[in-house]
Amino acid sequence: MTVRASAGQPTPPSPRERSDADAPERLPTVWAGGAFAWGTRTFVMAIVNATPDSFSGDGMLGDPAAATAAALHAVVDGANLIDIGAESTRPGHTAVAAADELARLLPILRAIRASVDVPISVDTSKAEVAAAALAAGASLVNDVRGLTGDPDLAAVVAAHAVPAVITHDLPPNVREDLTLGIVRELSRRLDCAVSAGIAWEHLIVDPGFGFGKDWKQNLELLRRLGDLRVLGRPILVGTSRKGTIGRVLGVPEHDRVEGTAATIALAVANGADMVRVHDVRAQSRVARMADAVVRGAPAVARTWPGDPPG
């Protein structure tokens, strides 16, 4: 807590400070594929879509070279991990069989794994796909169904001793408080994951922006994101180019960079530990700037070409 020099009175704690003070202590997530020291910074997850029908129009199906170039650029631009998905989860998407998902995924995954040294997560809800991806070099599972879509997926995650993102994907109960309902369901899913043998420190929660929720509920969820800190697990936020931004600004997917930036800054201020983004260069800068405000200024000031002395 800081002190005003003029009045000598403590400033009120920020929403993040209040939620951090109430939240259980979170140990770092450390595994063979990497490490995340929660609370030290906001980690940036870069999206690589190995699909023909991504909602944002950036699918790279059948083009490992282009996907690898995108992943390399993402790392240079500030990504801490790469998230590869080969089945769209956009509204109205067509489900694909595990064999088709793997045919899309593995060539791109292997090419990226050979070219970058950051962790790679596989965005899938299928145990068969996750097992093959982990064998091919992925080291984290990001499941938008929260380990509820495939009864064997939790066992695969546990057997490989890797982290997993547990997402909330259900329509809210209109008779229940929004974030209370999300916390209850995520808590249930966390318990199931631990019962399946996944280490508590390996679990990350995602409130599921756009999954089962309308645009106004998504705005409320972002505003009240700190309520999820009670779960005691790091929070991943995926608002990048989502429809909520379009509903507010009236712009299509490719024109939602600024809207995404606003949601990223607010997410960091309200408790996010990781953000999943398309436009890595812009959004990693947003995350770093937000971190400087809510977590503390960098130890050393940066300079730029033409920076005047002093």
Image (cartoon, helix red, strand yellow):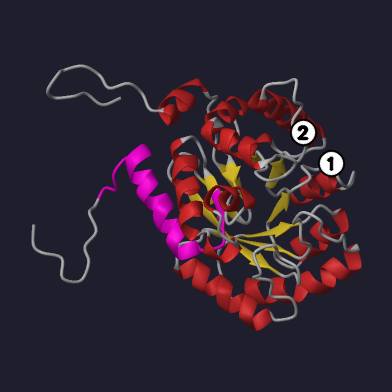
Residue 81: percent from left, percent from top: 57, 59
Q: Is residue 280 above or below residue 9?
A: below
Q: Are marks 2 and 1 in contact (CB under 8 Å)?
A: yes
Q: Is residue 43 above or below residue 214?
A: below
Quadrant of the snapshot with the N terminus:
top left
Q: Are there few (<14), some (14-19), or many (20+) residues within 10 Å of tag 2?
A: some
Q: Is residue 103 above or below residue 126?
A: below
Quadrant of the snapshot with the C terminus:
bottom left
User: Does the magenta portion include 282?
Assistant: yes
Question: Three-letter amino acid code at disc 2?
Answer: Arg
Q: Is 202 positioned to the left or the right of 1 in the image?
A: right
Q: Is 284 positioned to the left or the right of 31 in the image?
A: left
Residue under label 2, please give it: 189
Question: Three-letter amino acid code at disc 1?
Answer: Thr
Residues rendered magenta in the picture: 275-299
Q: Which mark is residue 148?
A: 1
Q: CA distance from mark 2 to mark 1?
A: 8 Å
Residue 262: percent from left, percent from top: 45, 48
Q: Quadrant of residue 78?
A: bottom left
Residue 25: percent from left, percent from top: 53, 27
Residue at x 71%, y 42% (from the top left corner): 167
Q: Is residue 47 above or below residue 260?
A: below
Q: Quadrant of residue 126?
A: bottom right
For the residue pair 152 and 74, the one nearer the viewer reads as 74
**Residue 114 visible in the displayed image:** no
Residue 97: percent from left, percent from top: 91, 63
Counting residues from the start of the chain, the first of labels 2 and 1 encountered is 1
Q: Main secondary structure of the magenta part?
A: helix
Q: Which mark is residue 288?
A: none
Residue at x 58%, y 57% (from the top left corner): 241
